[in-house]
């Protein structure tokens, strides 16, 4: 799919932004201590962006392939929903979530970075990849962020959503 600029017309209908976690909220690296406890780096700027989405009435959700307490803790701190342990069923889970919420895929944006995001990216209205996404995901994305995962890509998407409703510089 050719990469195109996201316009307000693309983003205004969106009422739910769904994010992958690893490689989107993080820089795709993990620190592991001698006891196997994991830690990741995330951007603090993401929190204010997600607050702005809530203010606009736009929902947000994390879908994560693995089950990881780090993901749960970050999602809880940010006040966003989180579904984990999906394995190869990300799209099936997203599809069921849309049914449960009475939403159409035409009102959803998905932000991903890797091959396990491709089905979700293909089925939503606004498919977004972070700047350092893998080629398989980039091939199906409508838009690529300027920032990489874990380095402000989530905030960039949130800011674009705000601008689509309130104008530039909002």
Image (cartoon, grey):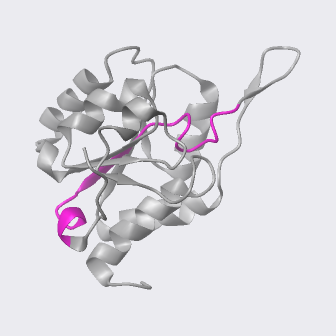
Please report the residue visible at 49 percent of the width from the left and 50 percent of the height from the top.
Answer: 79
Residue 37 occupies quadrant: top right
Please report the residue visible at 58 percent of the width from the left and 58 percent of the height from the top.
Answer: 152
* Nearer the observer, 165 or 126: 126
Q: Is residue 168 magenta?
A: no
* Nearer the observer, 54 or 129: 129
Q: Is residue 50 above or below residue 80?
A: below
Image coords of residue 162 (percent x, y) = 36, 73
Please report the residue visible at 33 percent of the width from the left and 37 percent of the height from the top.
Answer: 139
Residue 164 occupies quadrant: bottom left
Left or right: 3, with 150 as reference point: left
Overall secondary structure of the magenta section: loop
* Nearer the observer, 51 or 136: 136
Image coords of residue 33 (percent x, y) = 85, 21
Count up the numbered dots.
0
Q: Is residue 55 something one can see in this rendering?
A: no
Residue range corresponding to the magenta coloring: 9-29
Left or right: 132, with 80 as reference point: right
Direction right: furthest residue: 34
Residue 32 occupies quadrant: top right
Image coords of residue 149 (percent x, y) = 57, 46
Q: Is residue 73 something one can see in this rendering?
A: yes
Image coords of residue 7 (percent x, y) = 25, 70
């Amino acid at each position: 799919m050719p990469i195109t600029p996201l316009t307000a017309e693309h983003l205004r209908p969106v009422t739910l932004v769904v994010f992958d976690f690893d490689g989107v909220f993080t820089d795709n690296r993990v620190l592991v201590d001698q006891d196997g406890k994991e830690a990741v780096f995330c951007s603090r700027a993401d929190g204010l962006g997600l607050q702005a989405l809530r203010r606009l009435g736009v929902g947000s959700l994390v879908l994560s392939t693995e089950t990881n307490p780090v993901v749960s803790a970050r999602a809880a701190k940010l006040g966003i929903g989180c579904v984990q342990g999906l394995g190869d069923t990300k799209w099936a889970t997203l599809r069921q979530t849309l049914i449960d919420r009475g939403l159409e895929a035409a009102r959803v944006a998905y932000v991903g970075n890797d091959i396990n995001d491709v089905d979700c990216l293909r089925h939503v209205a606004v498919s977004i990849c972070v700047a350092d996404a893998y080629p398989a995901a980039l091939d199906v994305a409508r838009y690529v962020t300027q920032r990489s995962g874990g380095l402000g890509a989530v905030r960039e998407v949130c800011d674009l959503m705000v601008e689509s409703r309130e104008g530039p510089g909002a």
